[in-house]
Amino acid sequence: MLALNARPKPVRIDPTRTAVIVVDMQNAFASAGGMFDLAGIDISGAVPAIDANRRLLAAARESGMAVVYLQMSYKPDLSDGGDATSPNHYKELGMVMMRERPELRGKLLIDGSWDWQIVDALKPAPGDKIVRKSRYSGFCDTGLEAYLRARGIRYLLFSGVATNICVDATARDAYSREFWPILVEDAMNHSGPDFNRQSTLWNFENALGWVTRTDMVIAALQMEPAEPQPI
């Protein structure tokens, strides 16, 4: 077990039972010309988040941690996006923009599109797991939970975008499924006003999990393992 410096207090994790969950680090959410950028959402925080992810993932892979990429995605016919009876049809940004702006139809988060692709700086490595999802939570109608349980994974380090939407939704579901959710705050970027980010971090620090930073994860992985203790 390793002691990871976090808020509200340090938490012990077992690297052999830990996965980094990289949420939606796609052109749609992190690149100029992607969906967020086209919608007028500030993506300036994506650059430092990408850099933090590069360092986080390098350390995680070197330590033998599992790395899981979540990738928001729709079929070209949008059959998995939800019809007019689904709230996703009305609330998910890509679905809305493709209806309202005809020139974008078939281009936002569609399988195989540039918008859908994971950013070049964070391309998955051999052995990484990619989980396709069509809702905010990575646990919704995917094989994520089965994958984690089959490998005995219990502790989840979350990075990616958006802090207050897909990271939040997935990490909340992780908590309810008895995983240990730990948000790596500098490896994430939010959408909308900064109070969205602050609210998510407050909720996890006080009620749902823990909050840490990339340098703290790297420092913990470089330390000698501590004797197992009750948490």
Image (cartoon, rainbow, N blue to C red):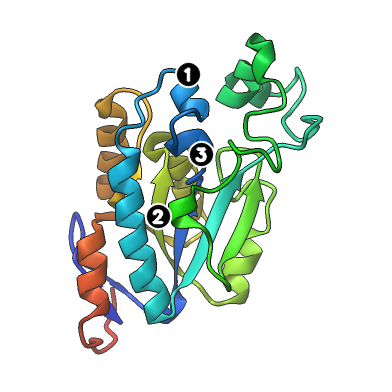
**Residue under the image location 53 percent in, 68 percent down:** 125
Residue type at tag 1: Ala
Residue type at tag 2: Phe
- Whole-angstrom CA distance, mark 1 to mark 3, is 13 Å
Q: Nearer the viewer, residue 216 or 53?
A: 53
Q: Secondary structure at mark 3?
A: helix
Q: Secondary structure at mark 2?
A: strand
Q: Which residue is mark 2?
A: 158
Q: Which residue is mark 3?
A: 27
Q: Secondary structure at mark 1?
A: loop
Q: Tell me the mark number nearer the camera, choosing from 2 and 1.
A: 1
The relative height of residue 101 versus residue 157 in the rendered view (above or below) is above
Q: Tell me the mark number nearer the camera, choosing from 3 and 2.
A: 3
Q: Which residue is mark 1?
A: 39
Q: Position of residue 130 (x, y in %)?
A: 61, 59
Q: Is residue 144 left or right of residue 68?
A: right
Numbered mark located on residue 8 in the image:
none
- Whole-angstrom CA distance, mark 3 to mark 2, is 18 Å
Contact check, label 3 and label 2, Cβ < 8 Å = no
The relative height of residue 26 versus residue 54 in the rendered view (above or below) is above
**Residue under the image location 38 percent in, 40 percent down:** 163
Q: Position of residue 109 (x, y in %)?
A: 63, 35
Q: Position of residue 73 (x, y in %)?
A: 66, 40
Q: Picture quarter containing residue 76?
A: top right
- Quadrant occupied by the N terminus: bottom left
Considering only order in the chain, which callout, 3 or 1, is on the residue closer to the N terminus?
3
Q: Picture quarter containing residue 31?
A: top left
Q: Is residue 26 visible?
A: yes
